[in-house]
Image (cartoon, rainbow, N blue to C red):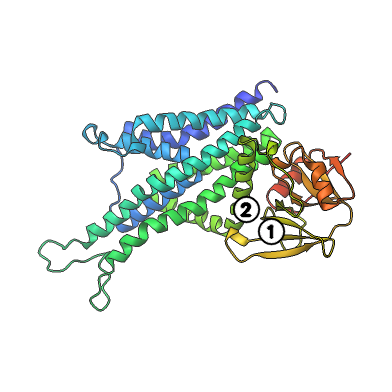
Amino acid sequence: MKRLAPFALFAALFCLFVGPLLGAVLPAATTTAPPADKSPAGTISSTITTITGIAISPLLGTGVYGAYKYVRASDEDRAKLAWYAQPAFFIPALLIALACAFKDTLGAVLPAGWKKPLDILETVENKASGLVAAGAVVPFTMDSLRGLVAEYAAPAPGATESTGLAMMNLAAIDFSWLLNILTVPLGIAVFAVVWMASHAINVLILLSPWGAIDAALKSARTALLGLITVTATLDPKIAAIMSVAVIIISYFVAGWSFRLMIFGTAFTWDYFTFRKYRFKVNASANKVFSGAHLEKVPLRTFGRLINEPETGGLRFAFKPWLVMPERSVEVKLKEPFVGRGLFFSSVRDGEYTLFLLPPRYRGHEEEVVKTYNLSGGVKDAGLLKAWSSMRELFGGSATKTQVT
């Protein structure tokens, strides 16, 4: 039974990945497609749903959206479609998404660490495809709103004035130009918020040592994308409501998602550039991430751990959102030591995690101990229990770690 488990998991993931594509293609290929809703509500609903779907999984979403546009277009119009709606793009994109599903399936049975290089590659891919989608696909999608503005701004037959959505006149002032300016930035802002929340799943997979958890996280994200896509073919307005709910939730977790994104970026940069071979611990200040038990500082906040020779203490300085005015907190230690983990190390005080050290610190744990005068030295940290680990990854209370 255990030998069949990976194949069953892969089959489930395969269905989740191809489901959105089939939902987009089959209505056009095998049935009579329902008439498109050309009303303002229908156009806006379709635009919101498309942006949200692409943001949830940029590579898969862009591939599915491109395939949908290609299948629905006539033979004469296919050559005029944008590059993302051409087979040369969406077929490789969907194959890469399927390969990622296969990777996560194998990861459920592989030893911890064997899948991490591929997880890092996928994290980089998610960042790159997110930039491509934000810079190309979203503006193309927002053209539908601008087209709606232009359509409703056109004068009706026999009319002497323009009417409709674009012509919201106040004291004879035409605000259609303002709508044109706001559509693309608004779409990119919505995309960025949802993408950060979705990208957090890639980083959680990167940090998790259990392949089964990786597959569960990926399946949940793909299932959400498939649900929104299939619902959009049945009732665009319901899909838009679901998308708005996703956008609202993403907005409220934006800070957590942003900090996790920065941590994942540092992790992948250190890994691909072999930073640990060039890195040297600075005697006065070093860049680290806050742990779950550093008071008055959110988990995984990027900042500097500073030595204060005049007081003999430590201080953590950071800028919220990396650009806000700098803040700092005093660090009080009782039983400090460096816990050497499987993928990255941490500065701990007894059973609590105070700071997370990026991979560049691997092999430099002894230097960290000397620099910050950590009385407990370096100890090998064992793996956290699955439930406790997930609590800490999602920002819950840090848990006890077995150390030797």
Q: Badge 1: few (under 14), some or many (20 or more) residues near its Cα, within 10 Å?
A: some
Please name the amino acid that badge 2 sits on: Arg
Identify whether 124 is placed above or below 287: above
Q: Which mark is residue 281?
A: none
Q: Secondary structure at mark 1?
A: loop
**Residue at 28% of width from left, 45% of height from top?**
35
Tell me the quarter of the picture where residue 93 sits.
top left
Tell me the quarter of the picture where residue 24 sits.
top left
Considering depth in this image, is 45 or 57 the residue closer to the camera? Answer: 57
Please name the amino acid that badge 1 sits on: Pro
Q: Is residue 234 visible?
A: no
Q: Position of residue 324 (x, y in %)?
A: 59, 64
Q: Horizontally, is 225 left or right of 68 in the view?
A: right
Q: Which mark is residue 298?
A: 1
Tell me the quarter of the picture where residue 204 sits.
top right
Query: Which quarter of the rendered picture does the C terminus lie within?
Result: top right
Query: Which quarter of the rendered picture does the N terminus lie within?
Result: top right
Q: Position of residue 114 (x, y in %)?
A: 68, 28
Q: Position of residue 240 (x, y in %)?
A: 43, 53
Q: Badge 2: few (under 14), some or many (20 or more) residues near its Cα, within 10 Å?
A: many
Contact, CB < 8 Å: mark 1 with mark 2? yes
Q: Which mark is residue 259?
A: 2
Circle nearer the N terminus (1, 2): 2
